[in-house]
Image (cartoon, coloured by chain):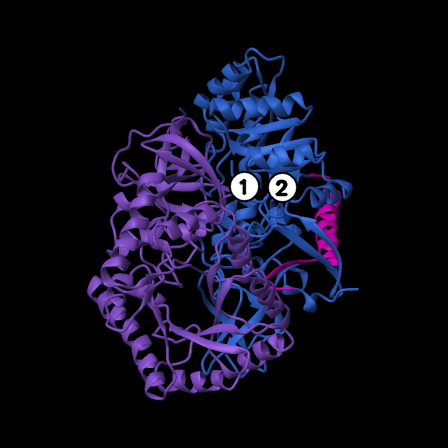
Chain colours: A blue, B purple
Amino acid sequence: MTNIKTLDTPTLLLDHQKLLKNISDIADFANEQGVSYRPHIKTHKSVRIAQLQVEAGAVGITTAKISEAEVMAAGGIKDILIAYPISNPDKINRLIQLLKKGVRLKVAVDNPESLGYLQRGLEHTPFTLEVWIKVNSGLNRCGVEPGKEALLLAKAIMTHSKLKLGGIFTHAGHSYAAKTYEEIESIGLQEGLAVVESANACEQAGIPISVRSVGSTPTFKIAGKVPGVTEIRPGNAVFFDAIQVGLGVTNFENCAVTILASVVGVYKDRIIFDTGSKSLCLDKGAHGNQTVSGFGEIIGHPEVLIERLSEEHGIGVFVQETHLKLNDKVQIIPNHACTVVNQFEEYVFHENGQVIDVWKVDARGMVK
Amino acid sequence: MTNIKTLDTPTLLLDHQKLLKNISDIADFANEQGVSYRPHIKTHKSVRIAQLQVEAGAVGITTAKISEAEVMAAGGIKDILIAYPISNPDKINRLIQLLKKGVRLKVAVDNPESLGYLQRGLEHTPFTLEVWIKVNSGLNRCGVEPGKEALLLAKAIMTHSKLKLGGIFTHAGHSYAAKTYEEIESIGLQEGLAVVESANACEQAGIPISVRSVGSTPTFKIAGKVPGVTEIRPGNAVFFDAIQVGLGVTNFENCAVTILASVVGVYKDRIIFDTGSKSLCLDKGAHGNQTVSGFGEIIGHPEVLIERLSEEHGIGVFVQETHLKLNDKVQIIPNHACTVVNQFEEYVFHENGQVIDVWKVDARGMVK
């Protein structure tokens, strides 16, 4: 057996039991509510973790980019929502390749112009493409406005022979800007309503909407309870991180991913770890928000605050006296697991501090 | 010939002529001043670019991590400064492997305790290790204080049979916090003096210091002129980026690295690009500073400011009316080239917008 504290640093560690608990917590919630579970894999980018999620009951997965979907499809995941607007003809050709491979693909749409690109791309193929309308529930990134605009787009989709409307979805990423948990609850409720009201508007016009999908990690347990919602898509909840703790969504004990780091220097007023922005990343919140103060939580060492990062150095200051010394190893809970995981080639899986396996971050860097 | 505007996005582009000009500008400065040039390769992480630098006259390279040095050594680069404190016995064993391969290795030291670890690691090998004293010229990260503390460490090195003192160096990374170019000039001067005064203190005590090395990208043309300095080590200057432009160090025309991105959505009050924090990164300055306002400069489109980033979305706002439309492609000069390059597997080299080659980011993710 190899103890994690003997590993080279910095290393990306994944606590197997915490991972399994987080996955089953989401699956249990989905079961209780009678909604589907379609995790966003941008957090873990691992085929094997996606398979664990499917084994736990996920109906499929969500990706941001086509290249992520390609990696997951090659790994045997066959039901994929690409929650991203796609209009470029070369990218549409890659969607067709996924359809050829038998992937049950769904793609986000949020404007009439993109429907034309998709229709033309598919025209000389035997395929129709399932599209889901993305509605803007307040993040103000992509999406049509809920209600009337969603209905207009739904009607436009009906006029395109190669497109099939399968669902309406949203992502309440603005929950990461919430100052209180009450605010998250309010945003989660709005998120659910934005989707359900849009679906209702369509159905009243005779357009059936079978999937009504919601879910950021902060909000999925709220939006997922709104009557009429049929699916949740949390990503980060598979690992959690210091930002989620800062938002009041979970606690440090549930954070499954840590960075093993070494003390490489101790000075009068500071301590240096061998992990900087090229491993811990600069995120202090998601979507441009600031939720936490330092750059990661050092487990068992609240007396040290990682105050700033160079590329390969984490500079800690002393909140209180510390006994940490040169060559000591620590586990750091990252602020934002989704970007940190993407810096590494592989996860070292451990149970109670003993290494049990090494898994690849398969879709690392898949931004295309 | 392939025009870059036909490439899939996001893609990391490298302008060949700008790269060559930047390299020769540094080499010319070094020649004129009669100092050596030892570029930090953490910016490009490419063996072939390191080779271009050596062909232009670099005496060797600088790395932060051992894993970067291992990649560069495997690629044929034989003179390497690892500008990072190393005390862990397993890491010291990897230094010994590099020595076995004939690498002319130099390693940073900044405290007496680490000398003991290095000595013990080398004791039963035929090798001595060249160490360079790192002095703190104001960044307050690693390093002994200049002058007396440097001399004390130099004397301690002399008592270790397996260590050989080869130089004194510093990195004035706090120049990234400068508010004016005058401040950068003042920091650069201090940087040079910190090294020279430390070297003089040693030489007056009978300890010769052959290399006195300086150089962040903002300061190397100032510190490199301080009499007694023998070497410069700029990293970022090989590419430059929006942070360097913000500091007044260069202009956008010299920025060699860009991200090719697509417009994936146009809305009433915003425009969305397919490049977020997983490609453009969140840096607004180096070492925890804030130098620029947006998240990258869109070439030819000053009317759009990239105001916030999600992981895979760049959200632009309109400073003035724009003609950018769905599927348009733009080149974005990143804020911090050093972290952005590390997100990608490869560079697409181009000349005047035509693709000429694809080079690997060999040491990508080499944080160990």
Check if mark 2's residue and mark 1's residue have beta carbons within 8 Å. Answer: yes
Question: Quick one: SS at disc 1?
Answer: loop
Q: Main secondary structure of the magenta part?
A: helix
Whichever of callouts 2 and 1 sits on the residue coming sooner in the sequence is 1
Side of A44 relative to B330 (left or right): right
Outermost residue on the front side: it is B126
Question: Quick one: SS at disc 2?
Answer: loop
Label 2 crowd (10 A; few <14 / some 14-19 / many >=20)? many
Residue drawn at x 66%, y 44% is: A46
* A189 falls in the magenta region: no
| Front residue (pair A195, A259) | A259
| Front residue (pair B33, A225) | B33
Residue drawn at x 26%, y 34% is: B321
Provide the residue designation for mark 2. A233
Q: Quadrant of residue B128?
A: bottom right
Q: Quadrant of the N terminus of chain A?
A: bottom right
- Which amino acid, by three-letter code, is at mark 2? Arg
Task: Specify the segment rendered in magenta.
Answer: A8-36
List x then y, in percent, for residue B191: 30, 72
List x then y, in percent, for residue A235: 61, 46
Provide the residue designation for mark 1. A171
The chain identifier of the residue carrying mark 1 reads: A
